[in-house]
């Protein structure tokens, strides 16, 4: 699975503004050991080993995110998928790994096309969140922001 569950980790237009290199937020969907440039990092040793998802922000619904992770994990186990090798290095600088979707529009499209999440949640649920995401994007696209007013309104 790639970015198809990102909508459940970043559900708003503004959520995607944090996915910038050198911002301490991830830009790529890779895993590493104790590497803050990766989307997922493995921390600790032995029985204290844990996984941290760094993609979700403060606006995440933890129940939806957890459900999406469970769906992805179960799909991987049921289909015998292999974990990709550990990424080593600066994930911000790598162009050879899958990236976090850069916009809500892209994340919603990936969700809409996700056969894995449709199988796990059902078409009705996925369609509901696709509709919500597209509505959020459409409302934003119609808005005139303060920045636009300051930048373009009285330029003469």
Image (spheres, rainbow, N blue to C red):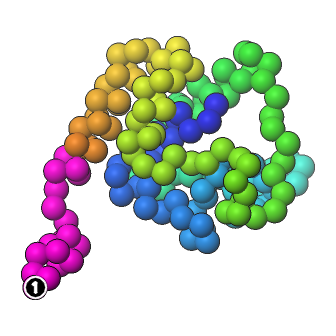
Image label count = 1
Q: Nearer the viewer, residue 96 or 89?
A: 96
For the N terminus, the image quarter is top right
Magenta span of residues: 139-156
Kindly give the residue lying farthest to the bottom in the view shown: 156
Q: Residue at x 32, y 38 (%)?
A: 133
Residue 27 found in image quarter: bottom right
Mark 1 highlights which residue? 156
Q: Is residue 151 magenta?
A: yes
Q: Is residue 5 above or below residue 79?
A: below
Q: Residue at x 48, y 32 (%)?
A: 110
Horizontal relation, residue 30 to residue 68: left or right: right
Q: Residue at x 71, y 24 (%)?
A: 76
Find residue 119 and report its horizontal and vertical position in percent: 52, 14
Find residue 45 and report its horizontal and vertical position in percent: 88, 54
Horizontal relation, residue 92 to residue 105: left or right: right
Q: Is residue 107 above or below residue 125?
A: below
Q: Nearer the viewer, residue 8 or 145?
A: 145
Find residue 23 and report its horizontal and vertical position in percent: 57, 70
Q: Residue at x 78, y 24 (%)?
A: 81
Residue 108 found in image quarter: top left
What secondary structure is marked by label 1? loop
What type of secondary structure mainly makes up the magenta span? helix
Horizontal relation, residue 48 to residue 121: left or right: right
Residue 83 found in image quarter: top right
């Amino acid at each position: 699975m790639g970015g198809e569950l990102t909508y459940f980790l970043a559900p708003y237009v503004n959520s995607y503004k944090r996915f910038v290199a050198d911002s301490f937020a991830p830009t790529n969907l890779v895993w590493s050991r104790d590497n803050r440039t990766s989307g997922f990092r493995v921390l600790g040793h032995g029985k204290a080993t844990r996984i941290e998802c760094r993609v979700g922000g403060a606006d995440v619904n933890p129940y939806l995110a957890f459900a999406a992770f469970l769906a992805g994990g179960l799909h991987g186990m049921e289909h015998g998928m292999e974990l990709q090798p550990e990424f080593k290095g600066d994930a911000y600088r790598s162009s050879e790994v899958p990236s976090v979707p850069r916009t809500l529009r892209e994340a919603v499209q990936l969700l809409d096309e996700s056969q894995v999440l449709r199988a796990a949640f059902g078409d009705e649920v996925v369609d509901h969140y696709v509709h919500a995401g597209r509505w959020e994007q459409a409302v934003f696209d119609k808005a005139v922001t303060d920045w636009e007013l300051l930048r373009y309104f009285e330029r003469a």
